[in-house]
Amino acid sequence: MDDFERKIIPEIDPALEFRSSFRGTTSVYEVRKDDSVYVLKMADLLYNNGSQQIQTERRALSIAKDFEGITHLVHDYGDVGQFTAILKEYEEGEDLRTLSLLENIIPKDAVEGLKKQVEEIVRNFHQSGVAILDLGEYNFVVSPDFRKITLVDLGACRFADTLPLQEFERLKSLDISDISSMIY
Ligand SMILES: Nc1ncnc2c1ncn2[C@@H]1O[C@H](COP(=O)(O)OP(=O)(O)OP(=O)(O)O)[C@@H](O)[C@H]1O
Ligand SMILES: [Mg+2]
């Protein structure tokens, strides 16, 4: 842990214990609180792109609070000092990109089930007026038994009520083509 995490994470919530950092454009940390593991996602308010992503994720998570296959919101810290932050469920496993690089590690008989889950996740969002737009393999975590796949990043979503219908339809079709080109 470097000085940044040591100083900033307790300012967000003194009950959070830093465990590790994830790679991302925002700051994403595995943390522990009251004996459970969560993900803290935060951005500097001066960094427009990052704080906008968190704001977008808040809205998407509130729409998706009953969906399966995502990491739900646990706590919204809002703006704390210079930062904006959310706490989400942690999903144990490995991201799909890393697994895809280790060829043939996902059992053949698991792939179809994973694809169906991804399609269902995307369908639920689309039906609720959300296009996801960042359906890359890094944003999916596959469980250690390869039977469950979870979308962990909703920071790039676009919402139907902010777009012309035709544009929303175009974004939905981009999502569909993204998931059809995922490797597994
Ligand atoms: N809830 C979670 N459970 C497990 N792993 C997670 C979770 N959230 C994020 N991760 C891991 O952390 C990485 C970065 O998280 P996330 O994609 O949310 O950050 P980001 O800043 O939006 O990244 P980018 O903009 O590069 O997509 C993910 O690719 C994933 O490997
Ligand atoms: Mg991401």
Image (tube, rainbow, N blue to C red):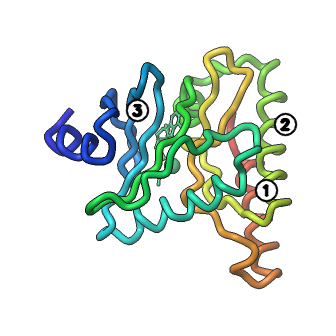
Residue 127: give its label.
Answer: none
Type of amino acid at the residue the image marks with label 3: Glu
Q: Look at the image and tell me in which quarter the C terminus lies.
A: top right
Q: Which residue is more in the foreground, 87 or 30?
A: 87
Ligand 1 neighbours mark 3 (CB distance < 8 Å): yes
Question: For mark 3, what is the residue?
Answer: 30
Q: Residue at x 61, y 17 (%)?
A: 144
In the rendered image, the vertical position of residue 168 relative to residue 133, given as above or below: below
Helix, strand or loop at disc 1?
helix
Q: Earlier in the sequence, mark 1 or mark 2?
A: 2
Type of amino acid at the residue the image marks with label 1: Ile
Marks 2/3 in contact by CB < 8 Å: the verdict is no
Residue 176: give its label.
Answer: 1
Question: For mark 2, what is the residue?
Answer: 116
* Spatial separation of the CA atoms under disc 1 and disc 2: 13 Å
Q: Residue at x 43, y 52 (%)?
A: 77
How many labels were placed on the picture?
3
Marks 1/3 in contact by CB < 8 Å: the verdict is no
> Which corner quadrant of the image does residue 177 belong to?
bottom right
Q: Earlier in the sequence, mark 2 or mark 3?
A: 3
Type of amino acid at the residue the image marks with label 2: Lys
Characterize the local packing of mark 1: few (<14), some (14-19) or many (20 or more) Cα atoms within 10 angstroms. Answer: some
* Spatial separation of the CA atoms under disc 1 and disc 3: 30 Å
Indicate left or right for 93 with 7 as reference.
Answer: right
Helix, strand or loop at disc 2?
helix
> Which corner quadrant of the image does residue 10 belong to?
top left
